[in-house]
Amino acid sequence: EGKDKLAEHLIYVADCVPDSFFYVIDELSVGQVQRGGRRGSSSVPRFRNGRRVNSDQRSLRRGRGESIRFEDDGRPTVSVSALWHVENEFGPLPYARGCSFFKIDPNTNLIVEGYEFPEPAVIKPGTTGLRTLSLASKLIEEPKRLLPFTAWVAYIYIVFFSQGILPGKDFFHTDPKTWIEVQNLSFNFMFIAPAAKLPVAAKLHPMLEGVFNGLLAWAAMFWGFLSDDRTGFGTGYDRDLDMTGRSARYYERLMQNQEQEFDNGIVVVPSVSITKRNLIPLLPTVIGMQFLTSAFFLPYLFARTSERRYESDYERFDRRGPGALRVRPLYREELDKTQVLGEWKGLGILLGSIGVFALWWGAGGRVEDAKDFGPPIWESGKRTTEFMKILANDRIAATIILDFWVFGFFQGWLVDDDWRRRGRSLEEESFLRNVAKFIPFFGLAAYLTFRPSYPSIKDGFDEELYDERTGQLRRRGSRRSDFSRGRGGPPRF
């Protein structure tokens, strides 16, 4: 019956396609009926090279192809999977195939849930239009996004197109001297070449080198927020899988039960959604910030998706009240591999140390070149005077100072959502977050060093760490227990 209902749905989809095209179902797989309870085990259909993989061939990171899943109100469902493509009289069309998953109620033959995974094309005008509409809706729904949006428009105009606002020529009239300066600053990246006295080290004003490398260290701190953009696949995700393999893996993660219910009635739920994708990915953004700083940073701020609280079925259907709920942080196993690297505690210490060295280098570096740049600032004001002359005539130097103002104003933009991902309350524990928001550079370095870590799923759950009234993590906790008091244990990854 479920197969017939799916066939009707696919015929309806086919009717929406022009007559000269054909909607072709390559393979259809129907699973067993799952009955009763909020939890259950089911086999997730997997595909490889257009063929269904047998149950004895399926393998997850743990287990033998089983995934934990839940049904609303205890209703039985049937899992149905389909591989499809679109073709015309000349054969299959490029970027017009995909994989679909459905959950069907066998009693009503209605589709309860559905997931579509079309193969992504290089460029799709429809996708571009949807992204534009999505961005416009974000700006309308959250007017505060207009602040980084306006700042970005002004920044692009001032830095690349304006005449007279910043010293020097605009981008379209840049002289070779400017590109030589950019090259020399790049040679002195993070002070490696001048400190080691390498032959490629360029001879530049130490204050200019200090602000340049200090800005790059500041931009690198946003590596610590990589968990703001997550696929939900976790560290077990294999990016080398083909399109159908990725779809099956994603479906597999969606079907896992992210809630744990214990024998004493306590229910533990994630603080935010396990999956969060942004219009602009964060990893390319932080890489681009090493080259064009605020030109990459500001668009991410106004285009990103805000964290939304995880909506628990227990909150919707359970009448025991919020006292039974406990909000857990995301687990490290729920983060991608690159995001785990952003959680390294030494990141804030390392980049903060580079900032301290940049201050010292600007104030007292290149003593051997005191004749050109002046002695250390505690001996004479010549060094500062020479640097102010550079700022008055050099567009690159003036842009770096402008970037400092932008970073100082927006550096705390991602802090609250990062705190929420860690299961912490925004009403309490505000000191560290305020340090990150209002102390430029070193405040953000301190936050990356002292913020709570994402726990491992192996660490277990301790009820004494939680406030019974709010369900949030307390500030302190000394004892740790495991999942042995619970029912069913932690979710699989």
Image (cartoon, rainbow, N blue to C red):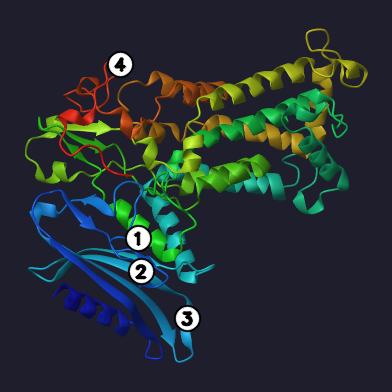
How far is disc 3 from disc 2 in space, using C-alphas?
15 Å
Look at 73% across and 34% down and name the residue there.
Answer: 398
Q: Earlier in the sequence, mark 2 or mark 1?
A: 2
How far is disc 3 from disc 1 in space, using C-alphas?
22 Å
Going by the image, does 83 lie left or right of 409?
Answer: left
> Which amino acid, by three-letter code, is at mark 4?
Arg
Residue 5 appears anywhere in the view: yes
How far is disc 3 from disc 4 in space, using C-alphas?
58 Å
Look at 35% across and 60% down and name the residue there.
Answer: 248
Q: Earlier in the sequence, mark 4 or mark 1?
A: 1
Q: Which residue is mark 2?
A: 99
How far is disc 2 from disc 4 in space, using C-alphas?
47 Å
Secondary structure under tag 4 reads loop
Check residue 248 in the rendering and tell me which mark sits there, or answer none.
Answer: 1
Q: Earlier in the sequence, mark 3 or mark 1?
A: 3
Instruction: Decide which of 123, 333 is in the foreground and name it.
Output: 333
Q: Nearer the viewer, mark 2 or mark 1?
A: 1
